[in-house]
Image (cartoon, grey):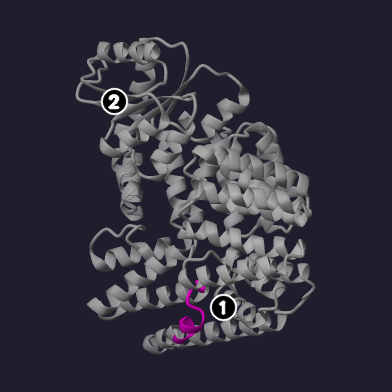
């Protein structure tokens, strides 16, 4: 049967009218009926907000404003395109950095200009065949129903479609990792590599070793992968993570720098390089990366006022105080109605004005910081709270600083990287080891509570164990270890005892909290599947 686009809704995103007409004529030749057009990125996003499309054909270079990759990123981030939509990025540019940037975004297809109807047809037909075949799996992934996605994937594997077998294995291994079944994922990757050396399978083995905390083995795999497959950008990202886990921050910076040189259009990677170089004290690299991040953020869904604040703080470190204030002014213009942006700006200003010897301005800025942070209780990111504590220390507001630090340490006592940030902040203002007693005391209290709760659980005293952790949560409301242990106990209790409405609602609330405080989804995978069986309905990670 000849491929056609009858019944499909299509969006063309192209700034040149003549090119839009040429593509439209090709589509009409394929029996397309519903074809809409957008001449820039903003109009494309607006169209996708109002309509559901089966195909989006988006040029990379759209003039001023968003480019095609930024349109794709925003469409996915805001869930404006479903798993069934075929998103094609089109470009006349052949520069390696641009092509790598586009492929980094993982469009369904990439088409170079000029192209003809036959080439367009081939790409669309291939993508629709793949999406139709995987629809039962992708639909459940989209819903967040991991157990059903795995079941559907296993069913397709037993049917034995040879053309789709390798893609199915890749998807099945990724689902296994998401669900915490690392042994299953390893078995699949080993099977694939026995037949053929595929970079994504080698990457998968490295990811498994990373999650097993075999960091040196993971580093070895990722280093070889970057050497053998230098265009696989995910390899650089995972290698930098592994270097960080091995406490090799300068190696992490070097590999991120290498990746950014290859593909400079990734705002998230530029941001990671900026932060890493900043921590390492390599301020020239950090400044360049922060500037790139701010520039890329102008039209990106991933833009953040924190990028401006990071650049301003860097200028403050080098005593380029006027540049810092100029950057903060630009941030206020860009984020005119953002309380967080104003809070970040005022926090940096307290330090800048202090360095400039303007005590009155520093005090005014600090009063603004405390006022806004009190209004945003529970909504201030932890690293910003740490900056606020620093500003309070510098301006002799020690009681407020200690209050903030106390809460941060208790909440994030199981996050060693953040505790090192706390130590680094205090060393930077001449207060070495100031909070070390509190850190160690809190760690000991957490260990004691955890051990006592686990003992009660093993003794079958589930209510007592839950009560203990509930009390601990009052003191450490966002602690990941306590939240995860509570989930384990309550899910086990539901499995073995009465699954009453109150217990079920408590479990749902805990799953929601676990997601909000950033517990690794792999640690929740088994618990989610067990809870879904108990509740006798699909449970999505978004509900959880």
Give the extent of the magenta segment.
Answer: 471-480
The picture places residue 205, in percent across and down from the top left corner, at: 58, 47
In this orientation, does residue 274 appear? yes
- Rate crowding at label 2 as few (under 14), some (14 to 19) or many (20 or more) other CA atoms within 10 Å: many
Q: Quadrant of the N terminus?
A: top left
The picture places residue 200, in percent across and down from the top left corner, at: 55, 38
The picture places residue 130, in percent across and down from the top left corner, at: 35, 30
Residue placed under numbered mark 2 in the picture: 10
Residue placed under numbered mark 1 in the picture: 407
The picture places residue 266, in percent across and down from the top left corner, at: 57, 38
Quadrant housing residue 349:
bottom right
Q: Secondary structure at mark 2?
A: strand
Vertical position of residue 73 compared to residue 345: above or below: above
Q: Secondary structure at mark 1?
A: helix
Q: Nearer the viewer, residue 487 or 30?
A: 30
Magenta residues: mostly which secondary structure? helix
Vertical position of residue 101 compared to residue 158: above or below: above
């Amino acid at each position: 049967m000849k491929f056609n686009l009858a019944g499909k809704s299509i969006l063309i995103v192209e700034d040149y009218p003549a090119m839009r007409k040429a593509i439209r004529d090709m589509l009409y030749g394929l029996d397309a009926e519903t074809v809409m057009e957008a001449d820039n990125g903003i109009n494309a996003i607006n169209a996708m907000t109002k309509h559901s499309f089966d195909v989006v054909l988006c040029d990379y270079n759209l003039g001023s404003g968003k480019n095609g990759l930024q349109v794709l990123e925003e469409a996915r981030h805001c869930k404006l395109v479903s798993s069934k939509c075929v998103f094609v990025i089109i470009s006349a540019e052949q520069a390696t950095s641009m092509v790598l940037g586009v492929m980094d975004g993982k469009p369904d297809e990439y088409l170079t200009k000029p192209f003809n109807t036959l080439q367009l047809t081939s790409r669309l037909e291939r993508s629709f065949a793949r999406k139709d075949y995987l629809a039962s799996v992708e639909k459940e992934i989209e819903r967040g129903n991991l157990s059903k996605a795995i079941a559907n994937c296993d069913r397709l594997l037993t049917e034995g479609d040879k053309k789709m077998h390798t893609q199915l294995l890749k998807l099945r291994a990724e689902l296994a990792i998401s669900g915490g079944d690392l042994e299953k994922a390893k078995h699949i990757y080993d099977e694939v590599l026995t037949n053929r050396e595929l970079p994504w399978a080698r990457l998968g083995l490295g990811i498994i070793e990373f999650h097993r905390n075999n960091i040196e083995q993971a580093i070895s795999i990722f280093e070889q992968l970057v050497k053998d497959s230098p265009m696989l950008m995910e390899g650089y990202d995972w290698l930098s993570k592994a270097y960080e886990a091995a406490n090799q921050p300068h190696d992490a910076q070097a590999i991120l720098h290498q990746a950014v040189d290859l593909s400079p259009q990734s705002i998230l990677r530029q941001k990671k390089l900026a932060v890493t170089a900043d921590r390492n004290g390599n301020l020239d690299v950090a400044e360049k990366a922060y500037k790139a991040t701010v520039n890329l953020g102008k039209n990106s869904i991933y833009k953040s006022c924190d990028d401006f604040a990071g650049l301003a703080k860097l200028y403050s470190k080098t005593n380029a105080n006027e540049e810092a204030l100029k950057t903060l002014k630009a941030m206020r213009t860009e984020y005119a109605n953002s309380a967080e942006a104003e809070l970040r700006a005022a926090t940096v200003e307290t330090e800048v004005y202090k360095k400039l010897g303007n005590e009155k301005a520093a005090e005014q800025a600090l009063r603004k910081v405390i006022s806004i942070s009190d209004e945003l209780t529970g909504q201030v990111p932890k690293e910003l709270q740490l900056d606020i504590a620093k500003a309070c220390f510098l301006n002799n507001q020690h009681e407020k600083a200690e209050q903030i630090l106390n809460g941060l340490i208790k909440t994030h006592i199981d996050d060693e990287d953040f505790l090192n940030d706390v130590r680094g902040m205090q060393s930077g203002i001449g207060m070495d080891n100031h909070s070390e007693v509190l850190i160690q005391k809190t760690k000991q209290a957490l260990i004691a509570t955890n051990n006592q709760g686990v003992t009660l659980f093993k003794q079958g005293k589930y209510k007592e164990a839950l009560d203990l952790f509930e009390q601990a949560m009052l003191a450490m409301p966002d602690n990941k270890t306590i939240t995860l242990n509570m989930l384990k106990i309550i899910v086990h209790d539901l499995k073995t005892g009465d699954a009453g409405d109150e217990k079920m609602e408590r479990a749902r609330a805990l799953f929601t909290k676990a997601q909000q405080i950033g517990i690794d989804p792999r640690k929740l995978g088994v618990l989610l599947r067990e809870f879904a069986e108990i509740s006798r309905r699909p449970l999505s990670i978004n509900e959880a």
